[in-house]
Image (cartoon, helix red, strand yellow):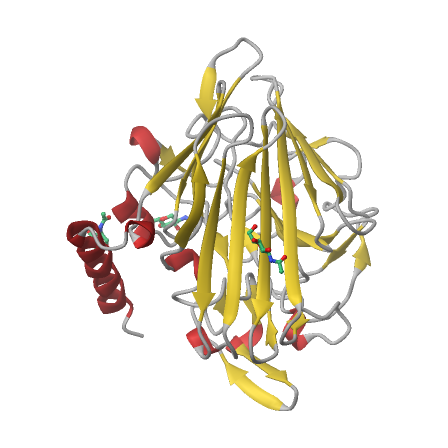
Amino acid sequence: MARAPVFLALLCLVATLLASGADARKMVGVYMLKKGDFSVKMTNWGATIMSIVLPDSKGNLADVVLGKDTLAEYVNDTSYFGPLTGRVAQRMARGRFVLDGKVYHTYINDGRNSIHGGHRGFSKVIWTVKEYVAGGSSPYITLYYRSFDGEQGFPGDLDVYATYQLSSPYALSIRTNATALNKATPVNFLQHVYLNLGGQGRGDVLGHTLQLFASRYTPMDEELLPSSGRVDPVAGTNYDFRTPTPIGARIRQVSGGKPGVHGYDINYVIDGAGMRKVAAVRDGASGRGLELSANQPAMQFYTANGLNDTKGKGGKVYRQYSGFCLETQAYPDAVNHPEFPSITVRPGQVYKHDMVYKFSF
Ligand SMILES: *[C@@H]1O[C@H](CO)[C@@H](O)[C@H](O)[C@H]1NC(C)=O
Ligand SMILES: *[C@@H]1O[C@H](CO)[C@@H](O)[C@H](O)[C@H]1NC(C)=O
Ligand SMILES: *[C@@H]1O[C@H](CO)[C@@H](O)[C@H](O)[C@H]1NC(C)=O
């Protein structure tokens, strides 16, 4: 799998775009959204959230998003620091699915499976900046990507929009949609933001208190696939976060997918339907809190088990549990599980995934 040459080609592409001064909206840039002392930094490389800055209870500002210092490092990144992943996020068994009797093969990039839409998924492409309002009462940026028929193995052209907006005080709303233009295709996006409410690079998140509005989960096998197709109650398991519980309380009893690795990398089925509360997190030390709402059926809870002396921002080094991800999504590998809600979008149909990150301090 010729990974390095592809990455080099991408770097050259970025460099060319930066140098040529071509259509400014197609260049890779950094875009700031700012409302008082709340600010979010984005890049149209992979629709990536680079930072979220807000005060703590004493008024001290900190960046609560793990990431990188330079765009070049984001291009190289394999930990998915902050981007929107698709066309089909999360793991897909053997990079294979059948739709309307036809077999499709997607790019294998996680052992013998696909993850996050393949090697060059939506997190590794240049999005077009459609609209950008940096300040005022509700700053926002709208990014657009036209995914082509056959891209990473997926069928049909797909029009994708993602709008990032600072709405009410200290709230970031993300509204995405995708329209299948000519063929039926599976669609599932997620925003892969690693958060540490104490500030990025400031220790681990094991003391953060987490509440999940989820009474069921999909057990995962050793490849982190929901191969059994079961949806089990969390009651009586180490996955039960229905009442606020420190992330670290039972983490040593949870398998993180690789031998000897502990931590959460598990899909929850969120109670209820439509736009609703998914999770609430609080860091006692800084006083910062986060309430996440979304309109998706499920959410992956990941405790950054794969970080291992990973170079981060501002000289910080990230390790296991340096951050957590709350990835609202469809059920993982739904394409291979008819018993899970379908993620097929037919021509003319529209996929919509909305999220609101509401911070407090
Ligand atoms: C990106 O990866 C390539 C190949 O591994 C490496 O040579 C280069 O230094 C990396 N660039 C950055 C900015 O990390
Ligand atoms: C998708 O989002 C864009 C940008 O917000 C919007 O202009 C468009 O109308 C939306 N499409 C659908 C079908 O909702
Ligand atoms: C972290 O990386 C080191 C060096 O590559 C390796 O020996 C160690 O097993 C890794 N730890 C985990 C938890 O993956």
In this picture, is 1 found above or below 267? below
Q: Residue at x 43, y 40 (%)?
A: 132
Say above or below: 337 vs 39. Answer: below
Of residues 302 and 293, the one nearer the viewer is 293
Question: Which is nearer the eye, 258 or 198?
Answer: 198
Q: Is residue 14 left or right of residue 228?
A: left
For image coordinates 52% across by 60% down, the residue present is 160
| 198 on left or right of 73 | right
Q: Residue at x 72, y 70 (%)?
A: 342
Image location of residue 14, percent across then percent down: 24, 55
Residue 21 at least partly seen: yes
Q: Is residue 105 above or below residue 225?
A: below
Taking the view exactly as shown, the residue that stands out farthest to the top is 58
Picture residue at 48% right of the left edge, 29% below the top:
64
The residue lying toward the viewer, choosing from 324 and 207, is: 324
Is any atom of residue 110 visible in this view?
Answer: no
Give x and y (percent) for residue 181.
56, 74
| Position of residue 105 measured from the top left corner of the image (x, y, whole percent) | 49, 82
Q: Quadrant of the C terminus?
A: top right
Q: How far across and down, in percent of the image, does residue 96 sit?
A: 54, 80
Q: Residue furthest bottom?
A: 101
Q: Quadrant of residue 221?
A: bottom right
Residue at the farthest left position: 19
